[in-house]
Image: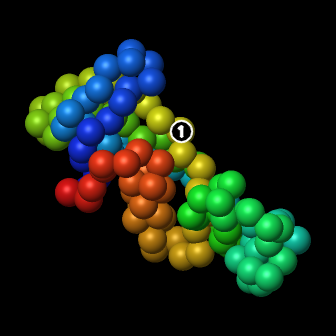
Amino acid sequence: MGVKGKFLDSNTGLTLTNAYISTYKSNTSVATLADDDKHNMYFKDSSLKPPGWDESFGCHSCGKFEVHAQVKVYTNKKARDNNLREVNVLNVTIFCNDTSEVYKCIYDKLKEKYEGLEDC
């Protein structure tokens, strides 16, 4: 599972026309947030959010769990399938409400941040 599409590699400045981004062999950690953590409080009661919160932080900025993940960027899916080395590693932090949807939330965040990516 991953996302693919046009991706501007900030390390090299190159545009990858058919990049493949995946959590394959990557580190992912999930932590349960305290009841008084703002991300958890805003998830439980969205009326507590300050004005502009969602616009500033985008989707997945509230939830019961904080997720840190490293995702690997490959030139294309064939490069990943052939176990070639990634061209970039991105760090992603999201907040998720359901641990069974951690990877879906990671990929949704990537699609939000990098226009043109789609599920594959």
Query: For the point 58% across and 64% down, which residue is it?
Result: 60
**Residue 98 visible in the shown view:** yes
Q: Position of residue 3 (x, y in %)?
A: 29, 51
Q: Quarter of the image for the C terminus: give it.
A: bottom left
Q: Position of residue 20 (x, y in %)?
A: 25, 41
Q: Position of residue 37 (x, y in %)?
A: 83, 66
Q: Is residue 88 above or below residue 37?
A: above
Query: For the point 20% across and 33% down, which residue is it?
Result: 17
Q: Amino acid at mark 1?
A: Asn
- Label 1, secondary structure: give it: strand
Which quadrant of the figure has residue 82?
top left
Which quadrant of the figure has residue 32?
bottom right
**What sort of colour scheme is used for the picture?**
rainbow
Label 1: how many Cα within 10 Å (few below 14, some 14–19, many 20+)? few
Horizontal side of residue 61 vs 76, given as left or right: right
Residue pointed to by mark 1: 91
Q: Is residue 48 above or below residue 24?
A: below
Which quadrant of the figure has residue 45?
bottom right
Horizontal side of residue 60 vs 42, given as left or right: left
Q: Is residue 51 above or below residue 45?
A: above
Query: For the point 54% across and 76% down, which residue is it?
Result: 98
